[in-house]
Image (tube, rainbow, N blue to C red):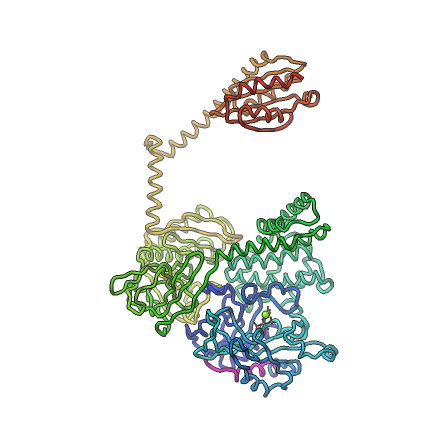
């Protein structure tokens, strides 16, 4: 069965059991401080489990893109070495939010595997939670009894907390689980070793395929468990592992999910898969990592130096390292795999198709730059090896190479090994640890549990219409971080404060109680669906009613920039073409920033067209037309621009001004005239194929032009208030160029005269033509003069000195034959004489110069020159 069919059969099976099929959420998380990437099917539904939001249908099924490369679930180092862990994989899931529980979950899983997919039940094992003393939890008898009716009891195994109690992170929803394992070994192998003993023992052919989680608890910050108000089902089946079983192969990499990519690598690198273990590991690593990187770029997460972007860069660099070392690829090539990948998976994940070119460009550029790093690193490493006089290279040197130049430590170790040298691993690790400690100390943060004041229903955002309203605090908690110190986070029953999101900054403002006491709101952010207000202090009476006021000035300016961002987006698509896609934006009160895909620098004409386009719409006084809650599909049909990599609910908000229509939760001006004016202040590249525009609107434009005006009047003043300043500057420039020419020719003339005079001053001492003299020429004039004299006279030794702007210059010329015959060396002479002028210098044996800060020493230096000839 083809992988595509395996995926669709899963979804159809649960659709027939009244589940809604939903598309995968983006893999890169935007408003969750506890998690960078979706690492399991449940992450996008966290708010449903916590009761912060309600799904439309309490039964859902999907295939979710997951990435396990950081935090609690990190499989990165396994990938490539085993055949069943990936960085990016698809997790097939069925979900019950407070609806069905263990009974249906177990029965349906069994039906799907054994009846629909036809898996022989004699290759299956299931596990059940054995209980945990630490958490005071009993064994999961209920699950055991349910399984008993499907599978013989000797195939039901007990599992410990590590394997059979599922937790997404250190905090949050969790519960006991039952895993389903397959044993796909040959009959002979099975006869030798009982499969039961291999379950959860990292055997490549006895692997877990499906985990059914019975979500009943919430893990709190202090480690204790509380019972969730409702019970939920969360299941996750590894799609690639399921394909391995159903396609009758022994490795995920032998399924049709991977084989097309592997064939392409074999062709490009000209190395077969399956003959050499090092090569095989490299091929698996690359075929896995290219998927992870491509999907995250499609989700809008480009490789970068910080946060999620850095994780992606590291994954790609791991792939490059393996291809460099084991496939001898010294030129970029991973980007060439994107084509097969998008052909293979573009159906299920259209973002791969529509963003193919961008993905290729970004990967190629990263490859180029990292390969350059590797080249440079090799040179540096060779130098370290040459300079070292021991056969162990210090950990500190290796760390420097790693930390400053990004040169991977395993490569350092490998190269040293090949040269018969050793690396001081312990020294390296200790440097690493020091650095980690430094950065941990800088980012440490602790979050206390919420203190609930009122049971909060779903909290409402009223800030589209109101900037001020009465609120009550429903819960709060303390957070402590190195950076901000002690802060409080408050949640209200309703709020006019806009929480940072969609690129727009969070609102600031204040809370005022009935006595007029004020607490400032310093920032507003969203965690999942909850709007959190940050304060330095808690209000006195937490149970009181407060007037909540948003800082209006900041908000209005931000709105002006946000609406301008939409118009800019529209303008770019109009002027440059519809290949322009938004890749990021930042809407502040002072300026806006917009990143978009486009492949060349914008011309001055394009920039002014874009500016004019936006300003025409501002002049057009377009009224805001918004729809607060319409079905997603309807919005798309009406022409709204949706972004890949954004997570939208079932219903969305649309924001329209004339023909610009976007899905957007941000706040906007009521009429484009409120923007007043739009001005681009910069355009440049952020990454290959991604450009960035920064622009300003409103008050900021006024300030911008005022600054320019001031500068202009200053310039005019300097030009004696010339009527036509541009012309006046051009005249000055021409005049200046003429003067330069004139001076040059005067200097030449002077040098010529000087040469004539100096000839008469040469004295012969011991067969050497000698002259030491202070002259009035600049350094290059002196050099020319020296070489001209040098052409006319043999055996010449000149020491010239000059004084300009309070500094001294010595310049020494020695005919080549004197260098040899008399051992005279201009370079050492200027160095020695340099001490008289308190300076130093050098050059070549036949010509050298020195500069110094003491012109008074020139006389002594000239005096001393003669001394070199007395020997
Ligand atoms: P394992 O012990 O094999 O690492 P797990 O206990 O980490 O698996 P879960 O967190 O329960 O797995 O995830 C549910 C399912 O997702 C697993 O049964 C497996 O089929 C699949 N899965 C988990 N991690 C990976 C991975 N790194 N690559 C591919 N599939 C995975
Ligand atoms: Mg795991």
Does any portion of residue 45 appear in the rendered image?
no
Is residue 712 a member of the stretch shown in magenta? no
Q: Nearer the viewer, residue 576 or 56?
A: 56
Residue 711 image point, x, y percent: 35, 39
Quarter of the image where one finds residue 319 = bottom right
Q: Residue furthest bottom?
A: 149
- Image height check: is 120 above or below 328? below
Quarter of the image where one finds residue 323 = bottom right
Looking at the rendered structure, the number of numbered marks drawn on it comes to 0
Does 712 sit left or right of 217 as displayed?
left
Q: Write down the region rendered in magenta.
A: 98-114
**In what quadrant of the picture does the N terminus appear?**
bottom right
Is residue 107 a member of the stretch shown in magenta? yes
Residue 183 image point, x, y percent: 67, 77
- Image height check: is 814 above or below 426? above
- Image height check: is 240 above or below 362? below
Instruction: Name the dominant secondary structure of the magenta segment.
Output: helix
On the rendering, which quadrant does ligand 2 occupy?
Answer: bottom right
Residue in view at x 59 percent, y 60 percent: 338
**In what quadrant of the picture does the C terminus appear?**
top right
Residue 94 image point, x, y percent: 52, 77
Does 267 sit left or right of 451 as displayed?
right
């Amino acid at each position: 069965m083809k992988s595509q069919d395996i995926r669709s059969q899963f979804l159809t099976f649960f659709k027939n059991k009244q589940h809604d099929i939903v598309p995968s959420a983006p893999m890169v998380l935007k408003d969750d401080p506890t998690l960078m990437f979706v690492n399991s099917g449940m992450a996008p539904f966290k708010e449903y489990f916590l009761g912060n939001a309600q799904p439309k249908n309490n039964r859902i099924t999907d295939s979710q893109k997951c990435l396990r490369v950081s935090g609690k679930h990190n499989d990165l180092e396994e990938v490539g070495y085993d055949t069943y862990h990936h960085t990016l994989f698809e997790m097939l899931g069925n979900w019950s939010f407070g609806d069905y529980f263990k009974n249906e979950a177990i029965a349906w899983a069994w039906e799907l595997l054994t009846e629909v997919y036809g898996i022989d039940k004699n290759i299956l094992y299931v596990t059940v939670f054995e209980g945990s003393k630490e958490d005071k939890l009993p064994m999961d008898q209920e699950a055991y009894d349910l399984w008993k009716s499907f599978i013989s009891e000797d195939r039901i195994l007990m599992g410990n907390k590590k394997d059979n109690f599922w937790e997404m992170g250190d905090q949050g929803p969790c519960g006991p689980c039952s895993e389903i394992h397959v044993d796909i070994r040959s009959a002979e192998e099975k006869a030798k070793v009982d499969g039961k003993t291999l379950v959860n023992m990292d055997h490549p052919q006895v692997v877990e395929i499906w985990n059914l989680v019975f979500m009943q608890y919430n893990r709190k910050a202090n480690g204790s468990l509380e019972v969730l108000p409702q019970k939920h089902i969360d299941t996750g089946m590894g799609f690639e592992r399921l394909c391995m079983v159903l396609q009758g192969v022994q490795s995920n990499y032998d399924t049709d999910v991977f084989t097309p990519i592997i064939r392409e690598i074999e062709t490009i690198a000209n190395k077969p898969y399956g003959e050499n273990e090092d090569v095989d590991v490299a091929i698996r690593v690359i075929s896995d990592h290219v998927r992870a990187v491509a999907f995250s770029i499609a989700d809008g997460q480009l490789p970068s130096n910080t946060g999620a972007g850095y994780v992606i860069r590291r994954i790609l660099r791991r792939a490059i390292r393996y291809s460099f070392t084991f496939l001898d690829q010294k030129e970029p090539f991973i980007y060439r795999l994107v084509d097969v990948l998008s052909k293979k998976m573009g159906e299920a994940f259209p973002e791969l198709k529509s963003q193919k070119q961008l993905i290729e460009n970004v990967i190629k550029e990263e490859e180029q730059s990292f390969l350059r790093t590797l080249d440079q690193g090799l040179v540096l490493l060779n130098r370290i090896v040459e300079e070292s006089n021991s056969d162990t290279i210090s950990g500190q040197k290796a760390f420097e190479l790693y930390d400053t130049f990004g040169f991977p430590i395993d490569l350092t170790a490998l190269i040293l090994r090949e040269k018969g040298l050793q690396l001081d691993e312990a020294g390296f690790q200790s440097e690493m640890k020091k650095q980690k400690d430094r950065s941990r100390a800088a980012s440490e943060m602790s979050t206390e549990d919420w203190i609930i004041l009122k049971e909060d229903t779903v909290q409402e955002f009223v800030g589209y219409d109101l900037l001020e309203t009465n609120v009550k605090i429903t819960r709060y908690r303390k957070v402590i971080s190195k950076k901000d110190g002690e802060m409080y986070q408050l949640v209200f029953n309703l709020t006019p404060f806009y929480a940072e999101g969609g690129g727009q900054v969070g609102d600031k403002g204040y809370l005022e109680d009935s006595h007029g006491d004020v607490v400032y709101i310093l920032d507003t952010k969203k965690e999942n669906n909850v709007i959190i207000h940050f304060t330095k202090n808690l209000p006195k009476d937490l149970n009181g009613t407060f007037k909540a006021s948003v800082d209006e000035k900041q908000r209005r300016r931000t709105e002006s920039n946000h609406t301008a961002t939409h118009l800019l987006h529209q303008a770019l698509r109009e002027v440059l073409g519809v290949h322009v896609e938004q890749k990021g934006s930042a809407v502040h009160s002072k300026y806006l920033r917009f990143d978009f895909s486009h492949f060349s620098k914008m011309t001055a004409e394009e920039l002014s067209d874009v500016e004019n386009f936006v300003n025409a719409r501002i002049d057009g006084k377009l009224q805001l037309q918004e729809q607060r809650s319409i079905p997603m599909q309807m919005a798309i049909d009406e022409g709204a621009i949706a972004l890949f990599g954004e997570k939208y609910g079932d219903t969305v908000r649309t924001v329209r001004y004339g023909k610009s229509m976007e899905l957007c939760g941000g706040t906007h001006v009521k009429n484009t005239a409120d923007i007043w004016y739009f001005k681009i202040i910069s355009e440049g590249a952020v990454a290959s194929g991604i450009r960035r525009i920064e622009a300003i609107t409103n008050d900021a434009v006024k300030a911008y032009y005022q600054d320019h005006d001031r500068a202009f009047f200053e310039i005019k003043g300097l030009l004696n208030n010339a009527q036509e300043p541009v012309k006046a500057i051009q005249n000055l420039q021409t005049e200046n160029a003429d003067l330069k020419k004139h001076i040059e020719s005067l200097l030449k003339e002077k040098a010529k005269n000087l040469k004539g005079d100096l000839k008469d001053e040469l004295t012969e001492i011991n067969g050497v033509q000698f002259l030491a003299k202070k002259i009035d020429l600049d350094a290059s004039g002196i050099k020319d003069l020296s070489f001209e004299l040098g052409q006319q006279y043999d055996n010449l030794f000149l020491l010239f000195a000059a004084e300009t702007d309070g500094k001294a210059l010595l310049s020494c010329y020695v005919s080549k034959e004197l260098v040899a015959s008399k051992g005279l060396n201009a370079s050492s002479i200027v160095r020695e004489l340099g001490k008289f002028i308190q300076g130093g210098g050098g050059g070549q044996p036949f010509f050298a110069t020195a500069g110094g800060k003491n012109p008074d020493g020139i006389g002594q230096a000239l005096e001393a020159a003669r001394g070199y000839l007395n020997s």
